[in-house]
Amino acid sequence: MRAWGSAAAVIAALRDEAAADIERLEREAAAALEAIRAATGPVDAAPDAEARLSAARRAAAERDADEDWQDTVGVATDRDAWIGAIVQQGGRVLATAPDAASWTAALAREAVAALPGDACVLVIPAALAGALGDGWRVALEHATGTRVTVEPGPLSAGCVARTPDGRVTFDNSLEARQRRVHAAWRGALARLYDAATAEAPAGAGEPAAATLMETAPAETT
C-alpha cells in the first residue's frame, strides 16, 4: 500500500498527475490532427460564389436577349413576306381593274403635264393599249393641250411619258410610284398587318394573313 503522507503532499501529487495527463492528451490530439492533415492534403479554397452567380446571371440575360431578337427577326420576316405578296397581288388587281382606263388617264395627265413642249410619247401597258382606243388618246390631248403619241410597252400598270427626242422622261408606272411613296405604303401595310396579327388569337397567324390577302389590295391603290 502506498503511503501518501500529509494532505498537502497528496494534493500536490494529484495536481502533478493531472498536469501530466493534460500534457499527454494535448500531444496525442496534436499528433492525431497532424495525421489527418497529412492524409487529406491541403484544402482548396472555395470558389468565389458571387462571381459565379454574376456570370450565371449574365448568361441568362444574354439567352433572353437572343430569344427576343430571334422573335423580332421572325416577326419582321413574316411581315415582309406578307407585304411582298400583297404588293404583287395588288399590282395584278390594278392592272385588270374595270376602272383601269380612268386612273391610267389620270396618271397620263400627270406625266404629260410634267414634260416640256407641246408633244410627247406616252407608253402604256400593252394589254391596255388595244382596249383604250384612239378616243382615249384624243381626250388626253384635249385635257393636256399636248400632242400625244401612244405606244404599248412592257408595263404592268400606269404609264411613262417622254419628249419626242427622249431627253426628258417622266415615269408614272405603278413600279415607279411604288418607289416614290415606298415609305408611306409600306408603313400603312405594316400597321395593317400588326393590327390584324395582334388581334388574332394564338396560333391563328395564317388565317389572319389570309384575310388580309383578300382585303389589302384596296389599300394599295
Image (cartoon, helix red, strand yellow):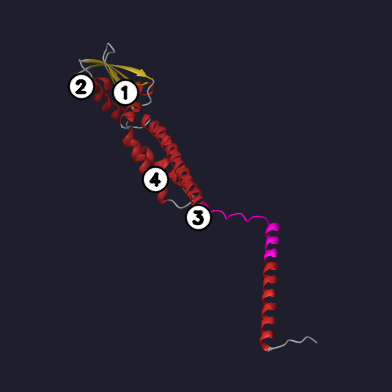
Q: CA distance from mark 4 to mark 1?
A: 33 Å
Quickly name the residue at label 2. 144
On-image quarter of the N terminus: bottom right
Q: Nearer the viewer, mark 4 or mark 1?
A: 4
Residue 153 seen by the camera: yes
In the rendered image, residue 47, in percent from the top left (x then y), is placed at 56, 53
Q: CA distance from mark 2 to mark 3?
A: 80 Å
Q: CA distance from mark 2 to mark 4?
A: 42 Å
Q: CA distance from mark 1 to mark 2?
A: 15 Å
What residue range appears in magenta? 30-53
Residue 221 seen by the camera: no
Horizontally, is 82 left or right of 186 in the view?
right
Point out which mark residue 159 bears. 1
In the rendered structure, which disc, 2 or 4, sits on the residue that comes first in sequence?
Answer: 2
In the rendered structure, which disc, 1 or 2, sits on the residue that comes first in sequence?
Answer: 2
Residues marked 2 and 3 touching at CB (< 8 Å): no
Is 99 contained in the magenta span? Answer: no
In the rendered structure, which disc, 4 or 1, sits on the residue that comes first in sequence?
Answer: 1
